[in-house]
Amino acid sequence: MNSQFTVRFWTSISLFKRYSSSNVIRHGLVGMVGRTPMVRLNKISDETGCDILAKAEMCNGGGSVKDRAAYFLIREALNNGQLKPGGTVVEGTAGNTGIGLAHMCLSMGFKCVIYMPNNQSQEKIDLLKTLGADVRPVPVVPWDDPNNYNHQAKRFADSIENAVWTNQFDNRANRQAHIETTGPEIWEETNGKVDAVTFSTGTGGTLAGVGIFLKEKNPKIQVVLADPQGSVLYNYFKHGKFERTPGDSITEGIGQGRLTENLKGAPVDDAWPIMEPDLLNMTFRLLDEEGFFVGASTGLNVFSAYQLAKQMGPGHTVVTCLCDTGQRYYAKLFCREVLEKRGLLDSLSEKYHKYLH
Ligand code: PMP
């Protein structure tokens, strides 16, 4: 088989044929990207009189919402010939995109090199190593510094043969994943009965992609950006200025200091800043009342959905997503000492302290 044929072969068989004709049997790992369960968060819904629904994105094959983007980034690199058999995928990531890419690289026979800011959870680094990725944690510096993890990833990809820097922040294949999968799934699973969606933003792929798809279907659907402390997006979308909100956040993978290509043109109706105590208590409420063990960006998403439902009033349907599981942050988010050091322990309701180690 020549290599061009091999790529075409993979592209048609392994990548595009993700579901069998019965739609029950999924084809391999990429078949496990998308079609995640849509879950009604029962207690929180009942309290507000709304349906607060969430796509359970930890059910993707690689365990997070970023598997969708990872699949589309690889699909594009294959389609445009940037990635050939035996090649290397290089990415800058807070971890979840890297984990999605590493899973897919194993299933397709590519090598994977991951540049990460060195303040991310150890669990994600360990998982990436287990998945065979070459993980390179680098000091945290802003985007406009040439040593930012994304620029280092690009430079490395440029320096070796048959490698692609997938560039999740500015490559619109990322938001395309949500235009083609998450958005249609939400529309179908709610039978079009959705009043609002709300998501936190890292690259902006989820928010922009879902927003673009749903607004086409019904422009009245509200798209609300939920932003952690220390990010510029709330101020940008609300007041038109690039100014960080005060403080920083225990969340990982979300918050942004610039307008990425994936975020540009996103149909955002409203934005609000979510405070640390609110997202933290919601993360533990999801565990305590609903039985979901999730990460902090999920706590933020669901707090935003809860706030939106209360604002809209009973009878509405608000959709968000559960981004990943709490296991990826066990040593940090669920640790008494870490919360105490960050000044968060006192703001966590006493009734949730029993879940800390
Ligand atoms: N939650 C988590 C845990 C993430 O890792 C990310 C992406 N880094 C997001 C939410 C946000 O997704 P997006 O990049 O599509 O904005």
Image (cartoon, grey):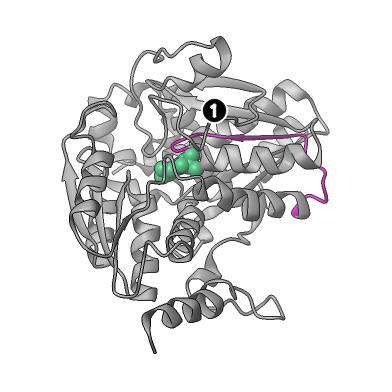
Mark 1: few/some/many CA within 10 Å (<14, 14-19, 20+)? many
Front residue of 221 and 289: 221
- Residue 272 picture location, percent across and down: 56, 20
Residue located at (28% from left, 35% from top): 336
Kindly report the secondary structure that dominates the magenta region of the rendered protein.
Answer: loop
Q: Which residues are magenta?
A: 189-203
From this viewpoint, is residue 284 visible?
no
Residue 161, x across and y down, in percent: 22, 63
- Is 158 situated left or right of 45 in this image? left
Q: Give the left or right position of residue 229, taking residue 188 as reference.
A: left
> Looking at this view, is 32 or 348 the one in front?
32
Query: Is 232 situated above or below 316?
Result: above
Q: Ligand 1 appears in which quadrant?
A: top left
Q: Residue at x 44, y 31 (%)?
A: 280
How many discs mark residues in the rendered view?
1
Q: How far across and how far down the image is residue 25, in percent?
A: 62, 80
Corner quadrant of residue 209: top right
Residue at 48% across / 22% down in the picture?
233
Indicate the quadrant where residue 214 lies: top right
Q: Residue 198 in magenta?
A: yes
Residue 206 at x, y percent in the picture: 55, 43
Quadrant where the image shows the C terminus: top left
SS at mark 1 in the image: strand
Is residue 134 found left or right of 150 in the rendered image?
left
- Mark 1, residue position: 226
Q: Nearer the viewer, residue 146 or 338?
A: 146
Residue located at (22% from left, 26% from top): 341
Q: Amino acid at mark 1?
A: Ala
Can residue 114 be seen from the camera position used here? yes
